[in-house]
Each structure stands twice: as C-alpha cells, then as structure tokens.
Image (tube, rainbow, N blue to C red):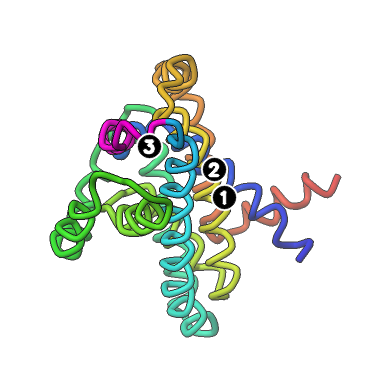
Amino acid sequence: MLDLAPMLASALILGLLGGGHCLGMCGGLMGALTLAIPPEQRGRRLQLLLAYNLGRILSYAAAGLLLGLAGWAIASTPFASALRVVAGLLLIAMGLYLAGWWSGLTRIEALGRGLWKYIQPFASRLLPVASMPRALLLGALWGWLPCGLVYSTLLWTSSQGSALESALLMLAFGLGTWPVLLATGLAAERITALLRKRSVRMAGGLLVILFGLWTLPGPHQAWLMGHAMH
C-alpha cells in the first residue's frame, strides 16, 4: 500500500491540475445544477452539490474498476507495455491541451459520445434536483460525460495491472477535481478565476506533460527513480 501512496498523490494532483479543463467541460453543468435547485432547497445547496460530486467521483471509480480488469488481464502480456506507452502519450497530449498549445485531444472525446447520447436523457429527467439521492444519481450519470482528461487518466490507471488500484487511483483523481467544480457550483469567483489564468494553465500543463513522460516505459524511469532515492 505504501508503494501506491505516490501514485494516489499523483492522481489527486492530476485531477486538481485538470481543474481548468473541468471548468470548460462541467462548469456550465454545475451552474445549471445550482439554478435547477428549487427555491425551497437553496439552503441545502452545499449538501446537494456534495452529493452530485460524490456520484460523479464514484462513477470514475467504477470506470476505473472496469477498465482496470482489462489492464489486469493483459498485465502479463506484451500488450502491457503498449498500454503504458498509449497512456503516457495521452497524458502528454492532455498537458499540451491544458497549457493551450494543442487541442487535438478533444477528438478522443468523440469516442464516448455514442454512449452519452443514451445516458443524457435519463440525466435530464432528474432536473430539478430536489433531494440528496436525486443529486447523487445525477452526478453518477454525468460522470460518464465524454472527457479527454478522464479518458487519459483511465488509460494510465488501467496500465497499473490491478483493477482495485485502478479504481482507487480514479477515486483519487475524482477527489482532485472536486474543489474546482464545488467552487464553481458555489460561485467562488476567486478560485475559478485563478484556474483560468494562462500562467496557471501552462504550469499545470507542463507538470502533466512531465508526468506523461515519466509514465512512458524506458531507461529514463530508472534514472528518475535513482535521483529520487538520492
């Protein structure tokens, strides 16, 4: 479990750094969710937003578990290295996107639109949100919204070769995205404005790119680990 701690921290940071992307993808949804809360429920806004985000994060963990099973199945095959290469390249592409240098990764989001068109009608029927279970279920459904950041992280977590580790890493990633979207739902302008700054986005993008380079298998990993030990 101690070996997993640095990976959990990395997943948490990846989710936090991806906050700018989350604002673009889900910020509008959080605003719509807040407006859709009936007037008599406005006093419970924080609880409903927490329930919504909990449902979203749990759906990430479920996706991590499912894809992690596939990663576990190929962990001892030659495809395992190929999966890590793809995961690393996608993380680099996400870093470029977060920094505003390349937006080609958004094309990957089209892969999930086929599934999403069947989920969205069910999610829309849950509005307005009038109860905690309703908010939890809505979040669980919105968690399957096509997102290049989530897809990249899913491939990275599944490349660990363990379904449980993949689920835990996706859970940590989801917790990392929580502060940004929760602040958006509560209209915390200072936090959202900070994450929209170009300098912050570029710094976050560079860190994600470095993480993607570290994920790629090769001799550079042994070099990095050697320096970390020293």
Q: Is residue 119 left or right of residue 45?
A: left
Q: Is residue 29 left or right of residue 73?
A: left
Identified at 43% across, 69% down, the residue is: 82
Could you tell me residue 175's position as x and y percent? 55, 47
Q: Identify the element where label 2 is drawn.
A: helix
Say whether residue 61 is magenta: no
Which callout, 2 or 1, points at the residue further toward the start of the chain?
Answer: 1
Q: Nearer the viewer, residue 151 or 221?
A: 151
Numbered badge on residue 186:
none
Q: CA distance from mark 1 to mark 3?
A: 34 Å
Are the two marked residues, 1 and 3, in contact with CB atoms closer than 8 angstroms? no
Span colored in magenta: 27-42
Residue sitting farthest toward the front = 40
Residue type (three-letter) at the residue carrying disc 2: Gly
Q: Is residue 41 left or right of residue 13?
A: left
Q: Nearer the viewer, mark 1 or mark 3?
A: 3
Q: Identify the element where label 3 is drawn.
A: helix
Q: CA distance from mark 2 to mark 1?
A: 8 Å
Which callout, 2 or 3, points at the residue further toward the start of the chain?
Answer: 3
Numbered badge on residue 176:
2
Q: CA distance from mark 2 to mark 3?
A: 27 Å
| Residue on which the image places disc 3 | 41
Q: Nearer the viewer, mark 2 or mark 3?
A: 3
Q: Split into 4 quadrants, where in the image is the C terminus?
A: top right
Above or below: residue 10 compared with residue 200: below
| Residue on which the image places disc 1 | 11
